Image (cartoon, helix red, strand yellow):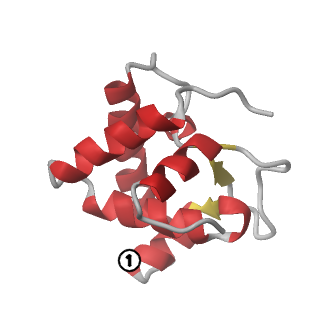
Amino acid sequence: MKRSLAPAAAYEAVLATLAERGTYASARAMLVAHHAMPNHVATMRHLARAVYGTPDHRIANRVYGSFAGRVRRELGIARLPYEIAVLGTWPEPPIDEVGEFAFRLRPEVCRAIRRLGWARAT
């Protein structure tokens, strides 16, 4: 099991603050879409298709990566090798059936999203 970087309450507070500021609305849509994926596992292509209607992963990479960096800084977590690691962990194997990198939302992030009322338990 991957170690927790922060408790669900801390994620909840940061996500609520960012939402109140009106920042990262599309990243919030990606979080909700990611939460809805089976086992909370998605690729950037999956998220781009779900939120933007395109399989072009580049926009999802930019938006989600920037958002993850902001969440990390708001949580006071030291820089990570991959910014997205603040939101997710890598399933085993991390490469999906079409050769794309997949990642799973951290349980603490899932709980925060549900507590905020952005998604229901799946």
Secondary structure category for the residue under label 1? helix
Residue 81: where, in percent of width, then height? Answer: 56, 26
* Residue displayed at 46% across by 53% down: 115
Report the residue that reaches farthest toward the left.
21
**Front residue of this view, candidates 109 and 52:** 109
Q: Quarter of the image holding residue 14? A: top left
Q: Which residue is mark 1?
A: 52
Q: Quadrant of the C terminus?
A: bottom right
* Residue displayed at 55% across by 49% down: 111
In this rendering, does residue 10 appear at all?
A: yes
Residue 59: where, in percent of width, then height? Answer: 38, 63
Q: Quadrant of the N terminus?
A: top right
Residue 112: where, in percent of width, then height? Answer: 48, 48
* Residue displayed at 72% across by 44% down: 90
Q: Is residue 7 above or below residue 37?
A: above
Report the residue that reaches farthest toward the right.
92
* Residue displayed at 41% across by 64% down: 118
**Would residue 118 appear left or right of 47 to someone viewing this image?**
left
Q: Which amino acid does the dot numbered 1 rest on? A: Tyr
**Front residue of this view, candidates 96 and 39:** 39
In this rendering, does residue 45 appear at all?
A: no
Report the residue that reaches farthest toward the top.
78
How many other residues sit within 10 Å of disc 1, few (<14), some (14-19) or many (≥20)? Answer: some
Residue 55: where, in percent of width, then height? Answer: 51, 77
Q: How many marks?
A: 1
